[in-house]
Image (cartoon, helix red, strand yellow):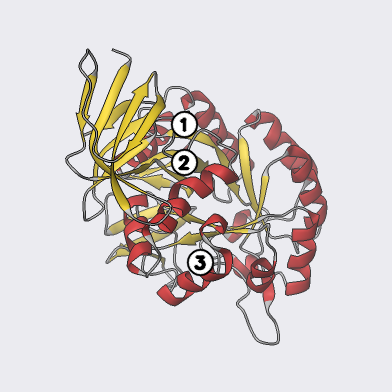
Amino acid sequence: MSLKIVHNVNVVQPTDHVQPATLWIRNGVIEKLEIGKTSLPEGNYERIDGQGHLLIPGMIDVHIHGANGFDMMDGTERSIQEVSRACAATGCTSFLATSVSSTMEDLLAMIRSVKRVIGHEIGAKIAGLHLEGPYLNPKRKGMQNERFLRHPNLKEIDDIFHEAEGLIKMVTIAPELPGGLELISYLKDKGVIIAVAHSDATYEEAKLAFKAGASHVTHCFNGMRPIHHRDPGLVAAAFEEEHVSLQAIVDGIHLHPAIIRLMHRLKGPEGIVLITDALQAMGLGDGNYMFGGHHVTVAGGIARLEDGTLASSTVTMNEALRLTIETGIPLKDAVQMASTTPARILDLGTKGKISAGCDADLVLLDEQFQVQWTMINGELIND
């Protein structure tokens, strides 16, 4: 039965109003969207009753490291699959498998495991790879392991790209390092998103990087030179550049609500991407973990290294969406930041929207933003 009709749902309209809707889905693609109460036709098709809940486009996480006790850097297919499963269960339908700074051997093992899983995911689909490091500044390393940080090496990155076979979609670097601008030129030629973080770049150095081709800021405000009125740094430079988009970890820990509202005011929903930056504690909660070669303790949902440094997050995409709205961001804008904007940035033209011709990647949420079911390519993953 190729036709499915999803009815009795509410969708967000451009006015920020939520209205009843019915969707016709055929062969994994949205065929028709009707706003308002609609009488269902006669015939043989699958009916899916949304019970009046909120239906949004599948969320897209461009920055996630692990979930449910599994770290994607361990080089196993199972870890990739378990993250795929956890993403789908929390409303994320596509994600970038994200590395941390490591040995070359461990990075290549992670890339190979992702290659083996793509096309066979049990949950959310892998949209590509995000390399977070190893070309990062030790001064702003955050949880990145300083043993593995190094200056840009074009021969090394070329070997990495060769192994990845076109899967690398985003690379996070510190552009002020020796060879940083040459690396930006290399990455620009490869057509990947050049992101900046774990960086001590000055305002002037950041401006040069953005002019050279960098267009994204990883976990904005975290792992970078802070704003000072005589030393505005990377963040102020990013605020001034219209083409530069920002990642936001909205977990109630990494960013104050006023900062989230400031980012939204300056960049709008089209310039901000919600991320989890989750480690393997996502879905498990408090306890002790190994991540990036460090001992990490999660207490009260907050992951820290032994010295107190924040070590990624445990937030899920549906929680990040709820928390974003609770800061005062309009629902339609928060959904755009979780779905539409990352789809645009990753050039996933048929994802991130509920409209005819788009992929039927959908999430049904209750009033508390708990996931009722996730649909990927027209197939229910969990209900």
Identify which amino acid the numbered label 2 is placed on.
Gly
Quarter assignment of residue 87:
top left
| Label annotation for residue 358 | 1
Q: Residue at x 54, y 27 (%)?
A: 115
Q: Secondary structure at mark 2?
A: loop
CA gap between label 2 and label 3 equals 19 Å
Residue 314 in view, yes or no: no
- Give the crowd class for mark 1: few <14, some 14-19, many >=20 residues within 10 Å: many
Q: Position of residue 315 (x, y in %)?
A: 35, 56
Q: Disc 3 marks which amino acid?
A: His
Depth order, front residue of 247/147? 247
Mark 2, residue position: 352
Q: Earlier in the sequence, mark 2 or mark 3?
A: 3
Q: Earlier in the sequence, mark 1 or mark 3?
A: 3
**Left or right: 61 with respect to 44?**
right
What label does residue 264 carry, if any?
A: 3
For marks 2 and 1, give the CA distance. Answer: 8 Å
Residue 245, image x and y in percent? 60, 57
The residue drawn where x is 57% and y is 64% is 267
Mark 2 and mark 1 in contact? Answer it, CB < 8 Å: yes
Residue in the foreground of this view, choosing between 270 and 22? 22
